[in-house]
Each structure stands twice: as C-alpha cells, then as structure tokens.
Image (tube, grey):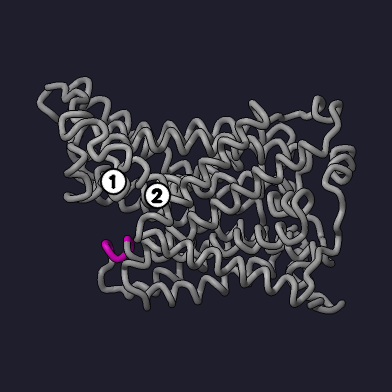
Amino acid sequence: MPVGNHLPQGETAQGGPLKRELGERHIRLMALGACIGVGLFLGSAKAIEMAGPAIMLSYIIGGLAILVIMRALGEMAVHNPVAGSFSRYAQDYLGPLAGFLTGWNYWFLWLVTCVAEITAVAVYMGIWFPDVPRWIWALAALISMGSINLIAVKAFGEFEFWFALIKIVTIIAMVLGGIGIIAFGFGNDGVALGISNLWTHGGFMPNGVQGVLMSLQMVMFAYLGVEMIGLTAGEAKNPQKTIPNAIGSVFWRILLFYVGALFVILSIYPWNEIGTQGSPFVMTFERLGIKTAAGIINFVVITAALSSCNGGIFSTGRMLYSLAQNGQAPAGFAKTSNNGVPRRALLLSIGALLLGVLLNYLVPEKVFVWVTAIATFGAIWTWVMILLAQLKFRKGLSASEAAGLKYRMWLYPVSSYLALAFLVLVVGLMAYFPDTRVALYVGPAFLVLLTVLFYVFKLQPTNVSQGAARSASVEAS
C-alpha cells in the first residue's frame, strides 16, 4: 500500500533515517521506566497472595531468565544495531514470517499495555479530582505522551529519563526508610522490627512450590519492557558501548528495586495482610511520619503509568516503522519527519489507543487481569523469538567471527536453551490456571490471523538479506 510521491511538508522519503540522539542515560532509564510500572507501587498484592514471601524467589528466577534473554538480544544488537531490533533479527535468521509475526505481535502487546496504563492515570487523577470525568484524564494522558513522542526522539528520551527517575527515587526512599524501621525501629518507638514476618505466617513459602509457580506469570509481566533496549539500537549515539552498559546495569537495578522493595514490605507487614489496607508504599511512608504519603505515592503512580505509556508509544511507533521498511506494513509508515521521527507510524498507534481507551471503559474489571495475561503471552513470544534468532545467528558465524563478537552470550548455547525451557514452563502454567488461560486463546488466535494476512497479501519483506552480511556493512560504516 504505497502512499504516493507527494509527501507532507517536513517529511522525508521512505526509509528516512532515524536520529541517533539517545544517550546511555536515556536508554538505561527507558528500560527501567518500562519495567517499574503501576503494579509494584500497588504492592504486587496479587502475586504476594499467591506465593507469600517466596515471591522474591519468583522475581529472582524470572530475572535470571530475563538476563539471558537480554544478553542474547545485546549480542545481536551490538553486532547489527538497527531499528525494529528483534523483529528484524527474527526476519533475518528465522525467516520473513517470523519477523512479520514478531513485529506485529509486539505492536499489539504494547497497545494492550498502554490502554491499561492510560486508564490507570485516569483512575488515580480521579482521587484528586473526583468530579472530573475519567475520559478527560485518559485523553489528556494520551495527547501529552503522544505529543512528546512526535516532537523528537531526544525530547522523548528526556521526559522518560525524568519520569523514571521519580519512580526510582521513590523506591530507594521507601527501601531506605523500610530498613530504618526493620533495623533501627524508626516509626516503631525505637524498637527494631526485624524480619521475622518473612517466615512466621505459615513459613517463607506458605503456599508451597505451587504458589511460586502460580506467581510466575505476573512476575514475567512485571519484566515486560526491558527488551525495549533493543528498539533503541537504531537511535543510540554509540550502540556498541551504550547497549551493553545499559543491559548490564538495568538488569541488576530492576532486580534490586523489585526484590529490595518486596523484602522491605514483606519484612514490615505480614504477607497475608498486604493489599487489604491500601498500598504498602503509602503505609510505609506514613509509618515513618510522612503525613502526605498518600498524595506523594499517588503522584508517583501517575508518573509511573505515564512513563510506561510514553515508552509504549515509542515502541509501537518504531516497530511499525521497521515493518514498513520491510514492506510488511503500508509504505507510508516508513516515512520520517525532518527531525527523524516516524510521525505517521506514531499517529496510527495513538489513534489505535484512542479506541482502546474507549473499549477499556466498556468492559468489566475482570478484563484487567486478562490484559496482563495477553500482554505476557505477547512478551513471551518476543523473548522466544529473540532466543531462537540468537541461536540461529550464532550457528551462521564462522569460528573466527564468533570469536570476534564484541558482546557475547554467557554459557552459549546452554543458557539459551534453559531460558527457552523456562518460557515454555510459564506458558504451560498460564494454560493450567483459569484466570490466565484466556491469553492462550487470544494470543495464538492473533498470531493465526497475522499468518493468514501474511500469505493472503504476500507480505514478503522488500529488503531480504542475510543478517550477517548486513551486520558487517553496518559495523564497517
């Protein structure tokens, strides 16, 4: 579906270059901002209910799998830093259909996630302004985040940096304050609280191994977004340096924030009471004597939702741009403005989100659980494609080429196969539990629909080339 030769003023022809304006600090905070979402600030109550204090073990296990996946993505992204990242790698190493499915699947999962985040902004703004209709706040959130993305990638990077920083500072303050309560008795009349709550209410693993397994789906949903680092490869100033540094630091920081925050919360409050009296973040700050804690946390949760939405709009726009470059989406979406922004791709995603916000108000609350499950399935598909593409990429290298890789997977190929097995386990668990089973109807059905469209419209990529060969030319340039 080419759009024609007459472009609106300020747009460049198909395949116009993106601007390399994202620095290392932008990329690090982007991935953190995408991962540290609303769920953590509400206490991860549902996951804690399933696993008890052993939820920390779930986050560590899931985090190790994510570390392997990110290492696999980093190996390819440093070797061949392109827009579209894992969609392009799936196309190059696994075939055109795999690239097509991966790209459109990722676009869809972020639309679903953004709908939830925009709605969350409206709900939390309603706490301060109960008389203002929710749809106004949802629309304002979408317009503001969409506008930031449309200005320039540097503007997006700056906003995301500060959004993420607000969340990180809040978590660090909560963890440090919590340690003060646990070790020194702050807010507890000077009596150190200790950490006995981790095992005195039915044990560290009160619901057994089954509880830990049940929580894995929600834990993996929490990690959704860390792969966004790969999408920045086409706009990073120095991808060979910034991407490895960002991958290494982001993983450990996410693990520290999630496990550290949960350790403090579960030490201070009995696990079976969390979620019954509001956000544990609010409760912890109030215990330290901060009377405005509820307002502070409400502000932070709003910025958390805006941050995730901001990153989601970025992701959908870049993925659609990459698909259009490959001839797997209408050609007009591969056009960029003079400042290197894929404006048409972003506008389509923003338009789709308008419909999503409307639909979100028409469905019952139960759908919010379904949304997380559907998004988790989409994320797992993306992560599986990353691992499979990396395995195929490595097999296509000669011994000397493999030895010359600037960023390498640890314990290849054992680590990749172990991570794949873990992801298969999570999908099996989603099928086992009724609340998450819906994802295995919606997710595969969407992939089947995409497959039919691929063959009916013969959406073969227009620039099929061997990944390794192009990688060499990219690195040489």
Q: Which residue is the site of mark 2?
A: 218
**Quadrant, the C terminus:** top right
- Residue 335 placement: quadrant: bottom right
Q: CA distance from mark 1 to mark 2?
A: 10 Å
470 to 101, vertically: above or below? above
Mark 1 and mark 2 in contact? Answer it, CB < 8 Å.
yes
Instruction: Give the amino acid type for the residue marked by disc 1 in the picture.
Output: Met
**Quadrant, the N terminus:** bottom right
Instruction: Give the amino acid type for the residue marked by disc 2 in the picture.
Output: Met
Give the residue at x 28% y 48%: 45
- Residue 169 percent location from the top left of the image: 40, 37
- Residue 151 placement: quadrant: bottom right
Instruction: Specify the segment rendered in magenta.
Output: 124-128
460 to 473, vertically: above or below? below
* The one of 234 and 237 positioned closer to us in this rendering: 234
Q: Secondary structure at mark 1?
A: helix
Q: Which residue is the site of mark 1?
A: 50
